[in-house]
Image: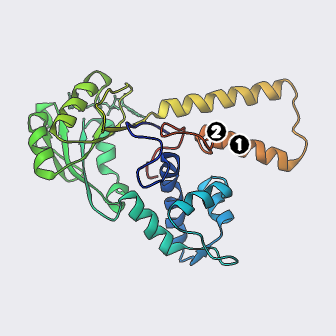
Amino acid sequence: MATGRTHRPATRSRGIPEATVARLPLYLRALTALSERSVPTVSSEELAAAAGVNSAKLRKDFSYLGSYGTRGVGYDVEYLVYQISRELGLTQDWPVVIVGIGNLGAALANYGGFASRGFRVAALIDADPAMAGKPVAGIPVQHTDELEKIIQDEGVSIGVIATPAGAAQQVCERLVAAGVTSILNFAPTVLSVPDGVDVRKVDLSIELQILAFHEQRKAGELAAGAVVPAAASRQETAAARRGAAAGREPAADQGPDGDVPAVMPT
Ligand SMILES: NC(=O)c1ccc[n+]([C@@H]2O[C@H](COP(=O)([O-])OP(=O)(O)OC[C@H]3O[C@@H](n4cnc5c(N)ncnc54)[C@H](O)[C@@H]3O)[C@@H](O)[C@H]2O)c1
C-alpha cells in the first residue's frame, strides 16, 4: 500500500536488506495472530502462507535475524514475535504527531492499533484556530504555531501528514526542521526531504486503481471466453493477482522502494 522513499542504502548497516525489513511487519502481524490463539510453534510454510510471502524468502529473511527454526518443529512463535519487534524497534515507545486533524487525521487519532504497537499519539496539530483545544480521541488539538515546541518537548521523530496536498510540503519542512526524521504521508503529493529522512506514502486510491486494472482484465478474460483449466491453476492465478495487487512478493533484487504493503496495522 505504501511506496517508501528512503534515503538509505538498499542494505542496512547491520546487513538486513530493506526488502526484508519491509516484510517483517507482515510476519509480525501473522505471528501476533498466532500468539493470540496461543499457538506455540509454526512452520515456515504455514507462516509464509499467513503472511502472504514465499516460504523460501521467509527462511532467508529470518536467517538475517539469526532465526533458523527447529527441523520438524518450526519456529517458536513468542520468541519470533520478540525478535522481530526488537529488530523493528517496537520494544520502545515511539511518540508520533499527526498534522491535519480533518476526516482522516481524526480517524487515525481514534485508531487504537497504534498504541498497542508502541506508537503513542503524542499530539494532534491543525492549522485551523477554531480546532485548537477541541478534543479528538481524548487529545486536545493544538495549533500549528506550537508545532516546533511540541516536537522538541515530546522528542518526536515520527510525523504523520494528513493535510490537504497543497500544505503537505510546507508541513513536512517544518517537521523536519524541528527534528522529525520519519514521515508517513497520506497527502496525495510527493514530498521532497533531505538525506536521512524516511518518507512512506499511503495512497488508498492507488490501491483501488490497481484493483480496477485487475477487474478490467478479468472482465476482458471472461468476455474472450478464457478458461483456466484446473482448480489449482485458478487458485494460483487468483493468489498471484492478489499478491500483485497487494504489492507482495517483490522481486529478490527489489530495493527499499520495493512494492511492498504499507507498514500499516489493520
Ligand atoms: N492516503 C489515502 O489513502 C488518503 C485517504 C483519504 C484522504 N487522503 C488525503 O488526506 C488528506 C486529508 O484528507 P481529509 O479528508 O481528512 O481532509 P480534511 O479537509 O477533512 O482535513 C484536512 C485538515 O488539515 C488541516 N490543515 C490544512 N492546512 C494545514 C496546515 N498547513 N497545517 C496543519 N493542518 C492543516 C485542515 O484545517 C483540516 O482540519 C488529504 O490530502 C486527502 O487527499 C488520503
Q: Position of residue 238 (x, y in %)?
A: 73, 43
Q: Secondary structure at mark 2?
A: helix
| Picture quadrant of ligand 1 | top left
Q: Give the amino acid type for the residue marked by disc 1 in the picture.
A: Ala
Note whether 38 is above or below 179 in the view shown. below
Quadrant hosting residue 98:
top left
Query: Which label was assigned to residue 244?
Result: 2
Q: Amino acid at mark 2?
A: Ala
Q: Identify the residue shown where x is 77% and y is 46%.
A: 236
Q: Residue furthest right?
A: 229
The residue at which mark 1 appears reads as 240
As displayed, is residue 172 above or below residue 70? above
Q: List x then y, in percent, for residue 250.
A: 60, 42
Question: Which one is nearer the viewer's eye here, 123 or 68?
Answer: 68
Q: Nearer the viewer, residue 9 or 59?
A: 9
The location of residue 252, given as percent across then percent down, is 62, 44
Residue at the (30%, 26%) spot, across then down: 164
Nearest the eye: 154 or 251: 251
- Could you tell me if residue 180 is visible in this image? yes
Find the distance from the CA under tag 2 to the CA under tag 1: 6 Å
- Give the residue drawn at x 28%, y 42%: 106
Do callouts 2 and 1 mark residues in contact (Cβ within 8 Å)?
Answer: yes
Indicate which disc residue 93 carries.
none
Farthest top residue? 166
Q: Secondary structure at mark 1?
A: helix
> Where is residue 5 shown, x and y percent of the image?
41, 34
Residue visible at 27% across and 42% down?
Answer: 181
- Residue 200 is left or right of residue 49, and the answer is left
Count the numbered circles shown.
2
